[in-house]
Amino acid sequence: TPAYDPAPVEARWSSFWERRGFFRADPAAAAAPYGIVIPPPNITGSLHLGHALNNTLQDVLIRWRRMAGDAALWIPGTDHAGIATQNVVERQLMAEGQSRELLGRDAFVRRVWQWRNESGRAIIAQLKRLGASCDWSREAFTMDEPRQAAVREAFVRLFKDGLIYRGQRLINWCPRCQTALSDIEVEHEETRGKMYYIKYPLADDPDLFLTVATTRPETLLGDTAVAVHPDDPRYNEWIDKTVLLPLTSRRIPIVGDAILVDREFGTGAVKITPAHDFNDEKAGQRHNLPKISILDEHGRIQPFLEEHGVDPAVRGDITQLSVAEARPRVERWLRERGQLLKVEDHTHPLGKCYRCRTVVEPYLSPQWFVRVNDPGKSLAKAAIDAVEGDQPAIRFIPEGWTNNYLGWMRQIEDWCISRQIWWGHQIPAWYCQQCNQDALLHTTPDGTPIVGIDARPIVELTPPERCPVCGQSELIQDPDVLDTWFSSALWPFSTLGWPQETDELKTFYPTNTLVTSFDIIFFWVARMIMFGLYFKKQAPFRTVYIHALVRDAEGQKMSKSKGNVIDPLVMMDKYGTDALRFTLAAMASPGRDIRLAEERIAGYRNFANKLWNAARFVLMNLDGPRDSRPAAERSLYNRWIISRLQRCIADTQQALAAYRFDEAANHLYHFTWNEYCDWYIEFSKSSLNDTGSPAAAMTRATLAESFETLLRLLHPFMPFITEELWQAFPHEGESIMVTPYPAPLPGMTDDTAEQDVEMIQAIVTGFRDMRSVHGIAPSHKLPGFVIVTDPQAARRVKAAADMVARLARLSRITVNPSDEPVHAAEGILEGRDARLLIALPAETMELAQEHAKEAARKEKRIKELAAQIERDEKTLANAQFLAKAPPHEVEKIRARHRENQAELKLMRESS
RNA sequence: GGGCGAUUAGCUCAGUGGGAGAGCGCUUGCUUCACACGCAAGAGGUCGCUGGUUCGAUACCAGCAUCGCCCACCA
């Protein structure tokens, strides 16, 4: 039989669903709104497994809620991903012998748009391939016209509210990307370097000196003080004296600073270079020190002004060199002048650009910032309050991430939002050339104006025609673009039409669930919360579901350079989308990472095939009358599967409500395979054999109904195969997508049927076990015996005798035989008092060897039982246990004890 | 340095204050009329170590070890 082939099925239904508009959500619908906004994938390339996981989980939620009757809206989109995308396109240009500079800004941006059109399309196609049921009519892009309007609105409002400002600040500067990076875009890496001990002589008394330790000797040219600890007896008398700065003619003060200086570390004296170190910048503010920048935007030593007093020989030697080139030269100069005391190897963390791994320089330049800790309207505080307390507006799942988030938010600093690149939202600020003559002196060769910190920006929604102050019409726009996360931070409402008060916004904001991974909690989630609260006065979502990162089977992060990337498209081609989706859902246990091995996907591919074949069985047995009487009036095995299905429905719903995709998937897998297929289908064959019987009619109805329900239950996880099969079944409606999700009906469970079938299963398994252990050929049909003391249980076994015989491949079952000799026996406990023993005839046990095997098995079991009995007796004899254990536990152990004793007795009697 | 997480079967991982689980892999048998991407049966674990709490700990607490992640300026 050919196996299930997913490819044609997937192609068929995704276009069908979209054509019929099943993904569209109506803001005017009466149903409860349920909204999710997609974490927009970057347009830098194709989707990886992390995206597949992320979007599978969102689609499971959306399909589930849609079927459950909500007006479910899932908004798709993509992110322009500023620096990342610019880098991709620049690399392409480089391969063509072109460059961004040669092209010029406008042409370059056009070129990136071209790339975004291709890449964006590819990403959307991949999402569709995954089965994502997004409302494609609302596809958004973080830089399309509506989002540009939202960005401008947000920027202007924040500016006018005093929450955006320009500042000359140390920022993390990537000399290669030529742009500022936010703190979290810098990755620290342990790097081997050297520690230089440099002599700073006192101006008054050149025999005395301070020894300063540094890893970056070249920056001493920008030193404006040396700090010692005010309580350090070695140096505190020297505070306020001056030292001679090596290689220069400058005198700089010694200051006392208890914050910057750790007496225990190094020499106890620290050079302060406010323009090249973040701590030094703060110390410089405390002591009112000037800032001297020694680097240009390329990270090269810049020509020094006279006033900096740098030794002309040194200046001539190092100007225009990179830091790496200049350092050994500065070292040599210091050594020649006898001011380098020693050099040691030293390992320390060094900041690198997270995009290109270039060493990041703390660099002084004018930048735009969002003030997050404004005393009056603190964005950070509001975002903290939203997740704290007993009834927080936002809940993290798993909740462990809450503290992580809070810890970060409590020490958050102003957000540097300007980037010196070309791809992004250009900042809506303009400068009058006339009024800012002093601040607008330079223009770089590529035509980018350098806007000094003293320039006065005009911030407006639309480009102003002329300067409101002088009436001059020559205005130039700020060349910087916004950090890519600025537009992402508006995403939950910009995608709903904000700043316009649309119906969508009214209905679907706040959204319900954000599904994302922990690596962007700070980049993105925190900023959405801040902006959502600020602009909409309401948190942008109620639940943040944080899923794990996908790694390979060895736990390595997947990367192209390691060659361990599992491409979701390849997996979908190979195993089918449903199999991939089911795998990802089943592995989404709360935790930090998922190790994905391809074999797991193959395992769930088999599951899809199993489902396919089960459906084939049901369909080929559907001919004939179907008797859909109330469940309680149906025969045992039908009552049983209906009851088991009820439990599966309840378990699945409960797991989904708790975001336990893994548990939901496992319940469904287990029910489908181990209950429906392994047992129910086998049970059903008995009554189906008698085609025309009333029993067959009842079974046909139950088979069809329960399978159809199961398909609906599985649909959010495996949308394609379930649609395909559902369409083949008798059904009402156009698509399984828009059928109701099965809801548990408490009255539909049937404990009696479940207990009866449990006993039958135990007997069948017992016989199979015996046959297997004794090596009895499957074709050898022999009689079986059941010895059961409880009369009621005996009746139940008698009623199931034919079924047991068939499933255990026995010729017949005799209950409580009076005269036939039995030999091999297996004890089975059923219920509390009914004990039963199953046996095969003695004549089958021909060989002494088998007797020995059997005896050994029995002995092992007896030993086991005896040990358990002893343990339980000890427990039951324990007065403290009886006094303190909950009654149901005591009863449980008593029952177990009784059963074990009974079984032990049976085992001993039968030997 | 601070914080977080992990440690359970050969592998990847669930799980619980009261007799250790799943998938894959492995062993054995099976062309049983939906399915060999299958059916049936089985082997395999001192639940990282040491203490503590408890009548009872794999689970709760503390310490230790190993691994991983995040944050941090140690000049």
Image (cartoon, coloured by chain):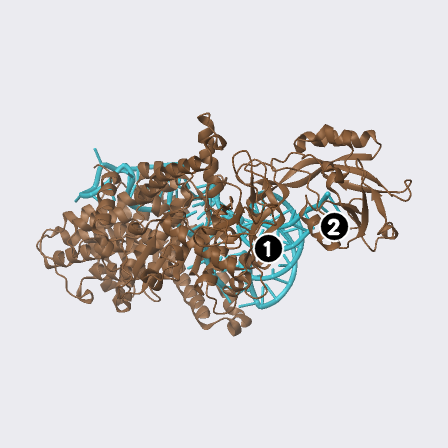
On the picture, is A713 further left or further right than A526?
A: left
Residue A201, picture quadrant:
top right
Tell me, for residue A289, which label it has, or none.
2
Q: Colour of chain B?
A: cyan
Residue A234 on image: x %, y %? 87, 49
Residue A580 on image: x %, y %? 35, 43
Letter of the chain that mark 1 sits on in the rendering? A
Q: Residues within 10 Å of mark 2 (few under 14, many from 20)?
A: many
Note whether A828 is above or below A587 in the view shown: below
Note whether A661 is above or below A880 in the view shown: above
In-front residue for pair A454/A584: A454
Residue A367 on image: x %, y %? 57, 48
Q: Which chain is brown?
A: A
Q: Residue at x 30, y 40 (%)?
A: A576
Residue A845 on image: x %, y %? 30, 44
In-front residue for pair A72/A204: A204
Tell me, for residue A413, which label it has, or none.
1
Q: Residue at x 59, y 65 (%)?
A: A375
On the picture, is A135 further left or further right than A399?
A: left
